Amino acid sequence: MPIAEILIFEGRTDDQKREIMREVTDALARSMDAEPERIRVILKEIPTNHFSVAGVSIADSRAAGQTPGRK
């Protein structure tokens, strides 16, 4: 039974999250020749102030109008 754990930043709609889970399930079913009914997807949302790049939180980078990890 394949299990995929996906980490995303908070802020996506329920429809977007459903689509992510559908697409991941479809991709695993195709690539692993597995029945979709046997595939599990765990979707975890991370608050943007709980993740940083180069010591600066994503929330702070966004507030400053920057793209994290790019100069």
Image (cartoon, helix red, strand yellow):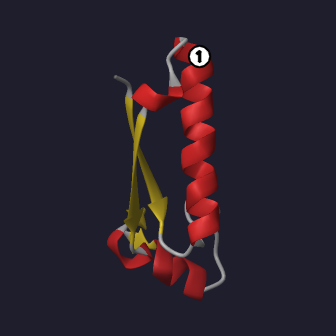
In this view of the protein, which residue sits in the foreground, 27 or 54? 27
Residue visible at 58% across and 80% down in the picture: 62
| Image position of 27 (left or right of 35) | right
Q: Position of residue 19 (x, y in %)?
A: 64, 53
Please tell me in which quadrant of the rendered image residue 38 appears: top left
Q: Where the N terminus falls, by quadrant? A: top left
Q: Residue at x 56, y 38 (%)?
A: 24
Could you say which is closer to the camera, residue 70 or residue 13? 13
- Residue occupied by mark 1: 31
| Place of residue 49 in the rendered image (x, y in percent of width and height, measured from the top left) | 38, 78
36 vs 50: above or below = above
Task: State whether residue 56 is above or below residue 63.
Answer: above
Q: Which three-letter amino acid code belongs to the residue tagged 1?
A: Ser
- Element type where label 1 sits in the image: helix
Q: Split into 4 quadrants, where in the image is the C terminus?
A: bottom right
Residue 38 relative to residue 62: left or right: left
> Which residue is farthest front?
37
- The outermost residue toward the bottom is 63
**Residue 32: image x %, image y %?**
52, 14
Task: Rate crowding at label 1 as few (under 14), some (14 to 19) or many (20 or more) other CA atoms within 10 Å.
Answer: few
**Residue that appears at 54% across and 78% down:** 61
Q: How many marks?
A: 1
Say above or below: 46 vs 44.
below
Question: Within the image, what quadrant is residue 14 found in?
Answer: bottom right
21 sits left or right of 57 in the view: right
In screen coordinates, is 4 left or right of 70?
left
**On the image, which quarter does residue 68 sit in?**
bottom right
